[in-house]
Image: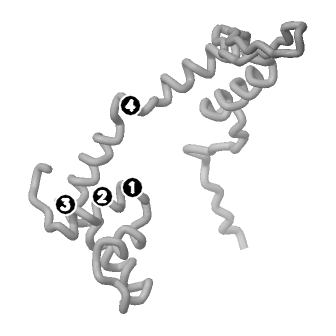
Amino acid sequence: MSEKLTPKQEKFCQEMSKLGNQRLAYQNSYSAKNMSEKSIDREASVLMKNPKVTQRLKELSEEIKSKNIADAVEIQTMLTKILRGEESEECVAVEGTGDGCSEARIVTKQVTPKDRIKACETLAKMRGYFDLTIKIDNAPTIVDDIK
């Protein structure tokens, strides 16, 4: 921590980082049983504007972005390998031995077309290819002042 927070402020930051909800984070960190939702929201907003709290939330956000969590590039790379058929999966194959018994062994097989299509869809969504909203920036403003 760069600057010292009170234990309740630290708890609020931890809860906010975990839940992403100001009201719940405040309720879990402070005595809010006799407070209205409006009061809780107001107090949580005040906390969120505290420079020490915002700094701590930034620090927690950076901690979350660890190497243990896949980032967007890693996810897109894996999805691309799946859709190109470059990934395979292990599965158990059970075969009869002819004497009424079964034998199980692990085999490697290609990813199914269904999984490849799903990877395509997921990648397209991540890349925004399905977003058909029209964004108008710098559009001329039409003023109709003729009466």
Q: Residue at x 37, y 81 (%)?
A: 40
Which quadrant: the C terminus?
bottom right
Depth check: 70 or 43 in front? 70
Residue 51's label in the rendered image is 3
Q: Residue at x 73, y 11 (%)?
A: 110
Residue 18's label in the rendered image is 1
Depth check: 130 or 1 in front? 1
User: In the rendered structure, which disc, 4 or 2, sits on the residue that comes first in sequence?
Assistant: 2
What is the C-alpha distance between the residues marked 4 and 1?
Answer: 17 Å
Mark 3 is on which residue type? Pro
Mark 2 is on which residue type? Gln
Q: Give the residue pinned by disc 2.
A: 14
Query: Which image quadrant is residue 83 in?
Result: top right
Residue 100 horizontal/vertical position (percent): 89, 15
Is residue 7 depicted above or below 33 in this figure? above
Query: Which image quadrant is residue 77 in?
Result: top right
Q: Nearer the viewer, mark 2 or mark 3?
A: 2
